[in-house]
Image (cartoon, rainbow, N blue to C red):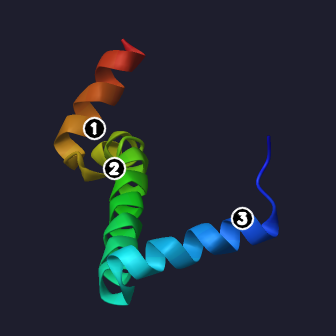
Amino acid sequence: MSFGITELVIILVIVLLLFGTTKLKSLGSDLGSAIKGFRTAIGDDDKPESSSKDETPASVQEKKTTTENS
């Protein structure tokens, strides 16, 4: 059982009549911001690891290299 174009258009018209355009616009905006937040949260998992190496002070990096060489 699959939906054709005409069934999808009928469902879209019914949803539009029930909720109205302003409600659907705010719903789409909220959904878009939620997806954007989700993507940045996933992307932030990789960034602290790489940025933490760049943000370490030079004295700490020197200590790491001297202990690694020993």
**Quadrant assignment for the N terminus:** top right
**The disc labelled 3 sits on which kind of residue?**
Glu
In front of the other: 14 or 53: 14
Query: Where does label 1 land, which residue?
Result: 61
Q: Residue 6: x, y in percent? A: 77, 71
Nearer to us: label 3 or label 2: 3
Q: Residue 30: x, y in percent? A: 31, 69
Query: Where does label 3 land, which residue?
Result: 7
Q: Residues within 10 Å of mark 3 (few under 14, many from 20)?
A: few
Query: Where does label 2 land, which residue?
Result: 41
Mark closest to the chain's N terminus, 3 or 2: 3
Residue at the (40%, 74%) spot, across then down: 28
Nearer to us: label 1 or label 3: 3
**The disc labelled 2 sits on which kind of residue?**
Ala
Q: Residue 16: x, y in percent? A: 45, 79
Mark closest to the chain's N terminus, 1 or 3: 3
Please identify the quarter of the rendering in which residue 66 is found. Answer: top left
**Quadrant assignment for the C terminus:** top left
